[in-house]
Structures are given as C-alpha cells and as structure tokens.
Image: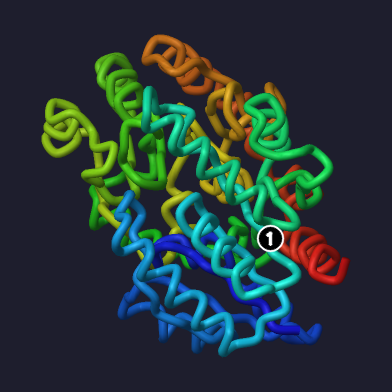
C-alpha cells in the first residue's frame, strides 16, 4: 500500500507524524510526504522511514502559485500511483484533495487539525469555510483530531457526520508517553545545562508555554496575567518556548514585555529536547482562542505537568476538567485566578499532573492512534 501525505511546511511534519511511518512500514505501508522545500526535510525523512517530495505550497492565498502547486501534485500522484492520499491543514487539504480527485485516487482522506476561520471575520471567514467544505466534499473520509471538531463541523455545515472520524479519543499521531515524554527518562545533564542557560533555578515556579507565539494562542492574555502574578510571587517565572511569527503576530507592546521582562524567558524555536523544557515547568498554559486539540497539552500531561486551557475549542478534549487540569476563559483575569490556585496549592497541581500522565497512557499512546489510522487505511 502506498500512501502520500501532503502538508504545507516542514514545521508540522515532526508534530503530525513522528515515528508512525516506521510502524506502518512493518505493516506493509510505504509512506511518502509532500512538503514545501526545506533543508531539514530530507534528513528527517531518512531517519523516519518515508520518501520526501518537495513541492512549494504556500499557507496564504496565492492563486497563481496554488495552480502551479496543484499541477505538480497531479504529476506526482500520476507518477506515484498512490493507493491513498492524505491532506493536512486547510491549504494542503484543499489542493491535495483536488489533485487526488483529478487523478482518480480512490481513497482521499482529509485530516482536519483545526478551524482557522473561527477567529476570522467577513469575507476571509467565508472563504476559509468554503475551503473546508470543498476539501470535505472531495474527500472520501475526514479525520477530526478531536470530538469538538466533529461537533463544530456539523454545526457549521462543513461535512456530513457519517464521513467524519475521530481516532480513539483524538489526535492525529498520539503521544510517546513511554519513551520521549516520560519524566523518568529525562537527561538531567541537559536539564541542568538549560537551567544555567536561561537562568532558571530548581526552586523557581515556572509557568510554561510551547508553540507559535501568536494572538490566537492566547499569548496576550498569558503575558498580561503573568505580569500581575509576578509582582505577587518572587519565584515565579514564565518560560515561552517557540517562535514569534508575523502571521497573527503579537502587538508590539507584548513583544516588548517578552523581550525585556526580567522574569520572562523566551527561547525562540526549539528543535531538540522539548521534553526537557516540559520537565522544567510547573504548569502549562494554552489559553487558546482556537485549537484542534493541542499537542502541547498532550506532551505536558505526559510529563506530569498540570494544564490550564480553554473550554470552547478542541483543547477541552485534551484534559479532564478538575482532574488533569482546569478550564479558563480567554482573558487575563480568569487565567490569573486559575494560575494562582495552582501556585497556592502545590499538592493540587501535583495531583492533576499525575492524573494527566495516566490519562495520556490510557487514551493517547501512539500505538493506539496509529492502529486507528491503519484501520482507516484498510477500510
């Protein structure tokens, strides 16, 4: 069986796939990935058992380039004779489903990782909703990474419920809670080096965030809440792990606070040892305005870190409220109040973190999710 996955940029490849291709290879699946050109793609493909194909696929609307990309995907699919084509993210999903339908690929699977239009308005919102509907209509199956996305898709008339699937309890790849994201397997030498590099003491209480530093992820609310709390707790630090982006970029005044606040540590993009950063956190915050599920929540919970996240997006499906974490509203006051509860009650935070790890082991282990994908391939 030959399967082609189409994504826009390399940044998402390690999050969407990690070690699943090796698992599939042992079960007779030959995996291919089409992605925009990136020097990191070929080495990662070599180490992770798939064949890479570099085709420029822009994330923003670009009619001329999109037509060129569709043509290149059609040529690739004709030459590759793939049994299944999987499209990821709105643009990757749309163009891959168009190309696969044009070529005549019988199994076309669109992975819905989130709904970009949720925080958009006007014409842009209508265009993005139309993109979701077209990709869904062209697909034979639609995989939603959380139950929330199924509900919202039905509510917004994107896809018929019978066509949609959730892999076990959610996610597109699961989480390696036994190996990589296991607090008992952490390299303490690396942790010590990171603490020294960023000026973090073992006694510090660290509020953490991992991912793109953009407005949709609730970074404005997080920074504002931290500014208030940092005046009350001398040992409180904020660790921001991820890149600042221009698309949906943060206001200048928030960037200024991030760069100058003495208790905020900003690392930029991190390629390796992300589990060591979670190990240094006492709490993880994802005060997101829109989310498919929240990979950072799965990773943090696997590391025994309690989570604060929003209840109105797919991130709600990554925690069990008041068991593995707590829900917050998308404002600084709500977030600050919830964080203060954890800070003042360390036993509660520890209890939620322990329960979070158990939740990941029971429901989000990678093999559980990968087996669901194989069932879909073989359906």
Residue drawn at (23%, 33%) of the image: 250
Q: Classify residue 227 by image quadrant.
A: top left
**Is residue 137 positioned above or below 17 on the image?**
above
Q: Residue 171, how many percent across, how many down? A: 66, 50
Quadrant showing the C terminus: bottom right
Task: Single out the residue that lies furthest toward the right.
Answer: 379
Foreground residue among 357 and 269 = 269
- In the image, taking residue 51 as reference, residue 205 lies left or right, namely left
Determine which residue is flagged by label 1: 109
Residue drawn at (64%, 36%) of the image: 158
Q: Residue 375, how many percent across, how many down? A: 85, 65
Q: Classify residue 107 by image quadrant.
A: bottom right
Residue drawn at (49%, 66%) of the image: 13
**Is residue 315 positioned above or below 56 on the image?**
above
Q: How is the image coloured?
A: rainbow
Q: Residue 193, how many percent across, how many down? A: 31, 63
Residue drawn at (38%, 64%) of the image: 67
**Is residue 212 positioned above or below 34 on the image?**
above
Q: Secondary structure at mark 1?
A: strand
Residue 246 appears in the picture as rendered? yes
Foreground residue among 294 and 67 = 67
Q: Residues within 10 Å of mark 1 (few under 14, many from 20)?
A: many
Foreground residue among 146 and 88 = 88
Residue 355 appears in the picture as rendered? no
Q: Residue 73, how many percent across, how many down? A: 48, 75
Foreground residue among 216 and 67 = 67
């Amino acid at each position: 069986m030959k399967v082609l996955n189409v994504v826009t940029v390399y940044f998402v490849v390690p999050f969407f796939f990690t070690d699943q291709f090796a698992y599939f290879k042992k079960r007779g699946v030959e995996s291919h990935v089409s992605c925009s050109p990136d020097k990191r793609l070929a080495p990662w493909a070599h180490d992770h058992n798939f064949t890479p194909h570099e085709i420029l696929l822009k994330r923003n609307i670009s009619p001329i380039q999109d037509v060129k990309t569709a043509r290149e995907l059609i040529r690739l699919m004709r030459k590759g004779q793939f049994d299944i084509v999987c499209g990821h993210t709105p643009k990757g999903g749309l163009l891959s489903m168009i190309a696969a339908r044009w070529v005549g690929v019988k199994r076309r699977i669109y992975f819905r990782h989130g709904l970009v239009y949720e925080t958009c308005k006007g014409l842009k919102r209508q265009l993005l909703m139309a993109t979701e509907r077209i990709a869904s209509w062209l697909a034979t199956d639609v995989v939603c990474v959380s139950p929330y996305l199924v509900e919202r898709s039905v509510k917004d008339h994107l896809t018929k419920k019978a066509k949609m699937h959730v892999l076990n309890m959610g996610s597109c790849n699961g989480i390696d809670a036994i190996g990589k994201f296991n607090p008992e397997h952490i390299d303490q030498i690396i942790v010590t080096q990171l603490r020294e590099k960023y000026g973090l003491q073992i006694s510090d209480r660290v509020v953490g965030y991992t991912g793109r530093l953009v407005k949709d992820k609730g970074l404005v609310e997080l920074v504002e809440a931290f500014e208030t709390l940092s005046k009350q707790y001398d040992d409180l630090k904020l660790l921001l792990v991820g890149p600042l982006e221009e698309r949906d970029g943060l206001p200048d005044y928030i960037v200024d606070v991030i760069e100058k606040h003495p208790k905020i540590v900003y690392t930029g993009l991190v390629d390796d040892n992300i589990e060591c950063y979670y190990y240094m956190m006492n709490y993880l915050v994802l005060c997101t305005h829109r989310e498919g599920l929240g990979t950072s929540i799965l990773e943090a919970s696997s590391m025994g870190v309690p989570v604060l996240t929003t209840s109105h997006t797919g991130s709600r499906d990554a925690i069990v409220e008041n068991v593995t974490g707590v829900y917050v509203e998308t404002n600084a006051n709500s977030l600050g109040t919830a964080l203060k509860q954890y800070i003042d009650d360390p036993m509660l935070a520890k209890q939620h973190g322990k329960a979070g790890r158990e939740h990941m082991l029971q429901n989000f282990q990678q093999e559980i999710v990968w087996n669901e994908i194989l069932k879909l391939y073989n359906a």
